Image (tube, coloured by chain):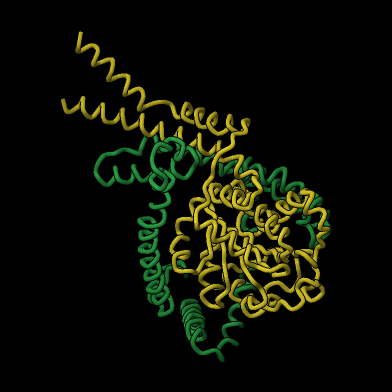
Chain colours: A yellow, B green
Amino acid sequence: MNQENNQEEKSFWEKLLSIDRRIIFLFIAVAIAVPLFFKVSMHIPVTPIVRGVYDAIEELPAGSKVLVSFDYDPGSMPELQPMAEAFFRHCFRKDLKVIIMGLWPQGPLQANMALEEVFKDEDIKAKNLQYGIDYVNLGFTAGNEVVIDRMGHSFEESYPKDGQGTPLSELPLMKGVKNYDNVDLIYSLSAGYPGTQEWVQYAVDVFHVKLAAGNTAVQAPSMYPYVQTGQLAGVLGGMKGGAEYETVLGIPGIAVRYMFSQAVAHAVICLFIIIGNLAFFSLRKRKRS
Amino acid sequence: MRREVPLVLTAMVGLTMIIAHFIPPLNILKDMFEDWFFIIAAFAIYLGVLNLLRINADKIYKKQRDWPFGIVVILGFLVITIPGLFFSGGRSFSEVGTPFYYLYIHVYYPLSATMFALLAFFVASASYRAFRARNVEATMLLVAAFVLMLGRVPIGDWITVWLPEGYRLGNAADWIMDFPQTAGQRAIMIGIALGLVSSALRVILGLERTYMGGD
């Protein structure tokens, strides 16, 4: 009888270990999708590494020029787009001038998407921001880190015209902007190569500009050494970083809203790992005995 | 000559880029080589497009395996390129409201995001099957992953709310990120940098020739 029970238990654990992956997929889908329909208010503490980004922008006086590089594509949009929108809101509310560029072909389009969303805000709409005066989109240029290097000497060498084909010399915002010396802060939104690492190596180390970054959760850990050495003012890592930034800014947006979904998904994955390990140890114990 | 010319060019450009960093007058040469790079990078895009079309057209013509996908690739290319080139206002094709922008938002963005989102499912499935506490090292990795996965989302602080402030899962996750993780990253970065220097030297000196497609 006891042996029969053992046999049943063994088959249960074995079954559990060889569970169809579509069942796991279903659990994950439910864990991600269902929380999206609930509005759960969560306390999101702001870490020093995120506060570094906030402080870097906050300490700039009105009228300062910020260069933002959009180096990602729609694949990384859930993580980086909330950061981009929050960044634009922060800059425009502080009356900073924003110069947009992209080392990835999709980057300038992502910037336009973020701008379209931000311009729906009543307070930003009221500012009546003008293209070419308050912000400008230089578009994409092929050349990766060489673009960054050349911009250290002259923006016009890498971007003779903006994304709409207007020569930089005809844009009021770009008057007096020759190179990084005329920019107060660079903000790199990146999901890989070329991205924040190249900005650190070719702009910060060579031209001593101030740099802050927003990265995907996968990429962010490799930026921590740069923050400790002061080469980066701060990093927003993944959706969590975006949510912290929205929190410190006092404008909860999509990152804060989606954190509940991410939290449930993480909890479900942890649960699966526990179950997998329980099954593993149970089978190992049985084999030994 | 087919081998010597690329070798000499590589050595010349590589050495100039290094020396120009220390001798500013040589920046003229550095700038010239960077101009060459811009031109090559721009042509690489056209080359990529032509190659994509040629390979897929060839596949369709010869009715090779999965040739219908070739039609999808070429159609997809034309559907996004023609509105971008001819119906979206020229250079301002990426502006809000153009047909190209519409296609980007409603076709390219959902497709691209879907492909990336599939990762979440595979990561969950792989974690379930492979993340085992088989030995001490694997257990340490597992514990660190657990702390990070729960500590990086608000749920971590919820389940450890009974602990004093500073000792909760969120704080533990921050500590792992700030110290052990950063130390490991730094070691990896120094290793990679040394490897890159040695590889670059091998390329410049002509010892490493695989980039030419041989040896």
Quadrant placement of the C terminus of chain A = top left
The answer to whether any part of residue B56 appears in the image is no
| Residue B47 placement: quadrant | bottom right
Using the image as rendered, state which of residue A128 and residue B198 is in the foreground.
A128
Residue at the spot 64% in from the left edge and 78% down from the top edge? A181
| Residue B124 placement: quadrant | top left
Looking at the image, residue A146 lies above or below residue A244: below
The answer to whether any part of residue A256 appears in the image is yes
Left or right of A150 in this view: A282? left
The residue lying furthest to the top in this view is A1
Using the image as rendered, state which of residue A167 and residue B3 is in the foreground.
A167
Residue at the spot 39% in from the left edge and 75% down from the top edge? B202
Q: Position of residue A8 (x, y in %)?
A: 28, 15
The residue lying furthest to the bottom in this view is B25
Quadrant placement of the N terminus of chain A = top left
Q: Position of residue A76 (x, y in %)?
A: 58, 49
Using the image as rendered, state which of residue B30 and residue A254 is in the foreground.
A254
| Residue B86 placement: quadrant | bottom right
Residue at the spot 29% in from the left edge and 39% down from the top edge? B133
Left or right of A38 in this view: B132? left
Q: Position of residue A61 (x, y in %)?
A: 68, 69
Using the image as rendered, state which of residue B211 and residue A217 is in the foreground.
A217
The residue lying furthest to the left in this view is A289
Looking at the image, residue B196 lies above or below residue B163: below
Q: Position of residue A51 (x, y in %)?
A: 54, 57
Q: How many marks?
A: 0
